[in-house]
Image: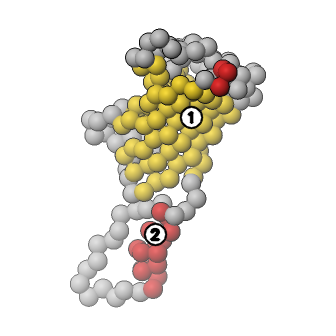
Amino acid sequence: MTFTPRTWVVGEVVTAALLNQEVRDQFNSMFAAWTTFTSSWTSSGTAPAIGNGTINGRYMKFGRNILCEIHTTMGSTTTYGSGNYSWSLPVQAASGGIAQIGNAQLLGSGGVRWVGQIVISSAATTCSAFLPVSSTDTRTDFLTATRPETLASTAQVRLTFMYEAAS
């Protein structure tokens, strides 16, 4: 992963090893494969359980910028709990006083695709998906087991976003 470059001093001997570390390795990390991580799916009420569903997370770090994807697919033994859903981040967000916004999709029953956004609060360790309240009310609210539709097996939640890491 990228890191803060060194501060060079007058008279320092530049070696191949230093150039490789400071230049080559920095560029290589920007073109490297994404890093996978396990995101936790939680709620403000009774906890959901993924059961035989899947949660796949991956991210890439560029300096303090994090590009991240989290895909959740509900299984036949998934339980949905209660309350507002959130997913853990791979790296804590910076505390800059600004909420970060990304994309959220729910691929629900019958192939209906709900489009919304995710919000990452300042210094947060989780993100939350906000989708339309219903097909007749396009205001957004937290994704829950029944909003914008009742979740069932094979439903998918796809989150894609970029944010500033705390370090």
The residue under the point 36% across, 86% down is 14
- Rendering coords of residue 136 (x, y %): 47, 11
How many numbered marks are there? Answer: 2
Looking at this view, is 36 or 112 the one in front?
112
The residue under the point 56% across, 38% down is 70
User: Is label 1 or label 2 in front?
Assistant: 1
SS at mark 2 in the image: helix
Residue neighbourhood size for the residue with mark 1, other residues' Cα within 10 Å, grouped as few (<14), some (14–19), many (≥20): some
Direction left: furthest residue: 10
Query: Do we see residue 115 in this rendering?
Result: yes
Q: Which mark is residue 158?
A: 1
Q: Quadrant of residue 71?
A: top right
The residue under the point 43% across, 62% down is 2
Decide: is 69 above or below 4: above
Query: Do we see residue 123 in this rendering?
Result: no
Residue neighbourhood size for the residue with mark 2, other residues' Cα within 10 Å, grouped as few (<14), some (14–19), many (≥20): some
- Rendering coords of residue 36 (x, y %): 60, 48
Looking at this view, is 18 or 161 the one in front?
161
Q: What amino acid type should be assigned to the residue bearing mark 2?
A: Phe
Looking at this view, is 145 or 104 the one in front?
104
Q: Quadrant of residue 155?
A: top right
Decide: is 116 above or below 3: above
Q: Which mark is residue 27?
A: 2
Q: What amino acid type should be assigned to the residue bearing mark 1?
A: Arg
SS at mark 1 in the image: strand
Q: Which mark is residue 147?
A: none
Going from the N terminus, do you reach mark 1 or mark 2 first? 2
How far is mark 1 from mark 2, CA to CA?
Answer: 29 Å
Decide: is 79 above or below 66: above
- Rendering coords of residue 23 (x, y %): 42, 75
The residue under the point 23% across, 84% down is 10
